[in-house]
Image (cartoon, rainbow, N blue to C red):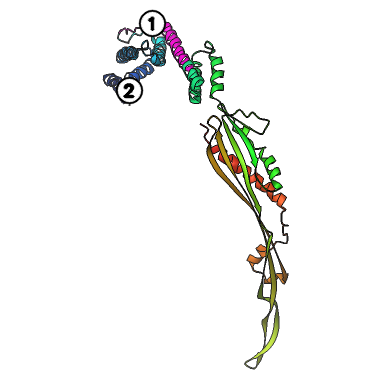
């Protein structure tokens, strides 16, 4: 059993060594590098195969990295500085993983050779040039916005300046430039309410619409306002037009029907003669009962019509015209019966409702319409794209 155990351990070791050698042969240098380090860490007797595999993988990985840096040619193509910086950091991280194993000598005395050096200066230069590239891009984009009013350019400028923060805080005047980009890229949307209703309810509804929670939509790039006191110097003006309101007459409909059934009221014992013999039998006594049901249906309808008009203040053109039509209906119901409750079917019993709602006033229905209209307006506003 002990012989088998040691044989298995030996076979695992052989296959592991072949495995890392195959990774190197296939060009899977990252994989081989990590695998070899994992196998060598903490081992007193370091297998020569792992040491040589690690040495070769490290050399190959660095060769590929330096060739990539040369190919990127960031001095000529400054947009590649961020990639160059990333490669140098990868090389440095690779060295940091390897450093605890140095000097690396195998169990057979093989001494691995690794080209280790500091890349702090290369990283500093790449970092400076990366930040400078983003900074210059941001300035160019801000200048474009100032000349053309292109808000997308200002947003892109802000993004470029945010990238600098990954490497350096408070780079040059980037904080001031971010504020400027935010100001130039901000889209302002102002809401106004126009009341065209020929109805005394219109003023109340118009006042209620001025409480639309448009400021809840504010974010980094959009500022929403409503009412006369708010700034009118906006990029877009959204006009909420109230164009029509209507209330139907109060309608009441009565429906009556009757239900009846025979029910067992008692069981009597009576004497009958059967085959000349008196016998007592039980006789069921039934009675027909009846109930008259009255249902009352009340109905009143209301509707409010309007539209959203979106104006681009620079062109003075209306770019959107969205109809808003909302309806709020009242339906009242009452049901009662006269007669014997036992005659009612289960369905009729469920309908019983002694509380019959009064018809709502036009004022109450107008308030309900206003709430529904506000929700419809906010739904449409959330769908709008102000560009």
Q: Which numbered disc, 1 or 2, marks the residue closer to the eye? A: 1
Question: Is there CB contact under 8 Å for labels 1 and 2?
Answer: no
Answer with left or right where residue 147 lies relative to residue 217. left
Rendered position, 281 above or below 64: below
SS type, badge 2: helix
195 relative to 117 in the view: left or right: right
> Which of the two residues, 262 or 150, is positioned nearer the viewer here?
150
* Numbered label attached to residue 9: 2
Residue 341 position within the rendered picture, expressed as x and y whole percent measured from the top left:
71, 69
Say which quarter of the image contains residue 9.
Answer: top left
For mark 1, give the secondary structure.
loop
Mark toward the start of the polypeptide (1 vs 2): 2
Q: Quadrant of residue 41?
A: top left
Asked if residue 326 is among those painted magenta in the image, a careful observer would answer: no
Residue at the farthest left position? 25
Horizontal and vertical percent position of residue 253: 67, 65
Q: CA distance from mark 1 to mark 2?
A: 38 Å
- The secondary structure making up most of the magenta span is helix
Q: Measuring from the top left, give residue 120's x and y in whole percent.
A: 43, 7
In the picture as drawn, the residue positioned furthest to the front comes out as: 316
- Give me the residue at 49% from left, 20% from top: 147
Residue occupying image coordinates x 53% and y 14%: 174
- Span of residues in magenta: 110-138
Q: Which mark is residue 117?
A: 1
The N terminus, quarter of image: top left
320 w.r.t. 281: above or below: above
Residue depicted at 59% across the width and 48% down the height: 325
Front one among 310 and 179:
310
**Above or below 151: residue 287:** below
């Amino acid at each position: 059993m002990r012989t088998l155990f040691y044989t298995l351990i030996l076979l695992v070791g052989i296959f592991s060594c072949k495995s890392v050698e195959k990774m190197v042969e296939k060009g899977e240098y990252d994989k081989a590098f990590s695998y070899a380090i994992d196998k060598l860490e903490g081992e007193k007797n370091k297998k020569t195969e792992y040491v040589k595999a690690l040495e070769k993988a490290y050399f190959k990985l660095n060769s590929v990295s330096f060739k990539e840096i040369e190919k990127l040619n960031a001095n000529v193509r400054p947009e590649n500085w961020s990639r160059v910086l990333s490669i140098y950091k990868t090389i440095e991280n690779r060295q940091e993983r390897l450093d605890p194993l140095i000097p690396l000598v195998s169990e057979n005395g093989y001494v691995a050779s690794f080209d280790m050096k500091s890349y702090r200066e290369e990283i500093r230069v790449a970092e400076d040039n990366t930040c400078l590239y983003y900074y210059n891009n941001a300035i160019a984009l801000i200048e474009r916005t100032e000349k053309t009013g292109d808000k997308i350019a200002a947003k892109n400028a802000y993004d470029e300046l945010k990238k600098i923060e990954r490497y350096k805080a408070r780079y040059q005047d980037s904080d001031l430039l971010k504020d400027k980009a935010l100001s130039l890229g901000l889209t302002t949307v102002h809401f106004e309410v126009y009341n065209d209703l020929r109805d005394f309810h219109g003023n109340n509804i118009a006042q209620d619409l001025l409480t639309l929670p448009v400021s809840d939509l504010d974010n980094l790039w959009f500022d929403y306002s409503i009412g006369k006191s708010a700034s009118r110097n906006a990029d877009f003006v959204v006009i909420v037009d109230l164009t029509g309101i209507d209330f139907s007459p109060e309608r009441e409909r009565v429906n009556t029907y009757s239900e009846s059934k025979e029910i067992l009221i008692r069981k009597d014992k009576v004497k009958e003669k059967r085959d000349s013999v008196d016998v007592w039998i039980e006789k069921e006594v039934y009675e027909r009962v009846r109930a008259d049901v009255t249902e009352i249906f009340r109905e009143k309808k209301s509707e409010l019509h309007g539209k959203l008009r979106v104006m681009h203040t620079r062109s003075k053109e209306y770019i959107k015209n969205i109809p808003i039509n909302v309806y709020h209906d009242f339906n009242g119901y009452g049901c009662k019966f006269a007669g014997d409750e036992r005659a009612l079917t289960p369905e009729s019993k469920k309908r019983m409702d002694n509380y019959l709602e009064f018809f709502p006033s036009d004022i109450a229905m107008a308030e309900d319409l206003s709430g529904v209209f506000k929700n419809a307006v906010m739904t449409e506003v959330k769908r709008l794209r102000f560009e």
